[in-house]
Image (cartoon, coloured by chain):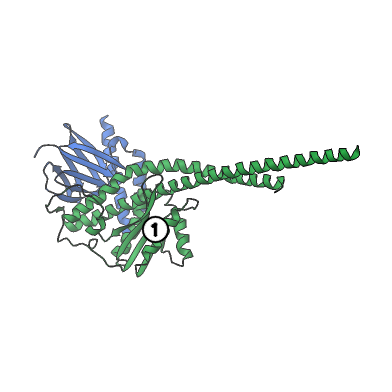
Amino acid sequence: MPGKYTLEIITPERIFFHGEVESVIIPTPDGYMSIQKMHEPMVSAISVGDMKLYTDGEWRECTTSAGFVEVRPDETIIFSQAVEWPEEIDIKRAQEARERAEERLRQKKSYQEYMQNQIALARAMVRLRVGRRNRNMD
Amino acid sequence: MASMGDIKHSIRSISETEQITRAMHLISTSKMRKAISRYDSNHVHFERVQSALKDILAHSHELSHPYIGESEHGRAAYVVIAADKGLCGGYNHNVLNLAYDYMQQSEERYILTVGQEARAFFDRRGYMVDVEFLHVSQNPSLYNARNITQDILELYDNNIMDEVYVVYTQFASVLRQEPKVLKLLPLSVSNFENVDTGTQYSAEMYYHPSPREVFDILVPQYIIGLVYGCLVQSFASEHCARMTAMENATNNAEDMIDDLTKKYNRARQFAITNEISEIIGALEALS
């Protein structure tokens, strides 16, 4: 159903977004999901990836780390460890993080550490992808 | 009356102490500003994530997951957050004593400490500290929060502990900080008695992809957020407490120096008067 609803994106370090949107597309463990007005109450996990907001007639893209979303009748709240606009991404830092994560994945580590590095790598990759894509458009 | 030399000596030593406390006060003030700005950007998340979870639990009956349920006081893990250093008034004392008293109700405890003062406290009382997180209390970061969360979940997932608590200092204002115990696991609606969800409706939640998968991801995320919030609040509280303590110490030192300076002047005056009267006495005896 088209129309605007309130969306909040909150990370432990700041309030990333608070405002009216028409749609938001989030990465979940089994693919992208779009949330629009009057969505039924829902809780979903969010995986590392790129997220899109449709507001004021344009799509805005950002990257997100792992988290979860709560859809309520009155508003939708996204909790994530880190969310960034493309212009905030430090490509060099992401590249270093990617190399670090790849290096650690190469070493044989416990399953826990393996999973953690896997996530760190995914985070770095999505930052690089979104960051580069937006820089090329300029 | 004390001699001039003695008084001079104590004035010098007090002013040296004053310099140190003044420097610590300035350092704490600047650290406190940084800490408070971190707190400001975190406290919305800290409150909203709790109210979101309460809301989720309130609308999810017939949900079973290892992270959810009530628990009796059995084996509990405690994450105790204190400072690395003393000299911050009652800050360490308050939070550590609360942790100590609270622990008495558990039959078996597993202690994880943040900050050297916390470790020293439990060592003195003959408790074994199982895990110590170094260099965390001076640098509350998401990275550290993730590491702590990982350790907590490992204990819980492997069924070594039934409950997990975090003991931290809640930051209310620059002048008021309060030690608090927060239950992390297992989750139940009773954990959130003081939390307002801000909304009332009666629909059941739909979980995507499945309740189990959602909670597998949601709970660690929630705990990372809370642990980070507790670290940030403790950090802000520590520096506010230290700033106040050092301000008082500096003021006291100033008062003492004023006092001693008066005494010193009096002693000097007394010595001069004495000398003059001796000279006059000698002159009179000569003539």
Q: Chain of mark 1?
A: B
Which image quadrant: the N terminus of chain A?
top left
| Residue underneath mark 1 | B80
Chain identifier for the blue-coloured part of the image: A
Above or below, B6 against A130 in this view is: below
Residue A65, position as x, y percentages in the image: 27, 46
Residue at the image position 72 percent from the left and 41 percent from the top: B268
| Front residue of this view, candidates A133 and B210 | B210
Residue B4, position as x, y percentages in the image: 71, 45
Query: Residue B161's image quarter?
Result: bottom left
In screen coordinates, is B59 left or right of A14? left
Which image quadrant: the C terminus of chain A?
top left
In screen coordinates, is B43 left or right of B94? left
Q: Tell me if I can see residue B141 in this picture.
A: yes
Give the residue at the far right of this rendering.
B287
Residue at the image position 32 percent from the left and 61 percent from the top: B164
| Front residue of this view, candidates A127 and B258 | B258
Residue A71, position as x, y percentages in the image: 17, 47
Residue B199, position as x, y percentages in the image: 17, 47
In screen coordinates, is B280 left or right of B246? right
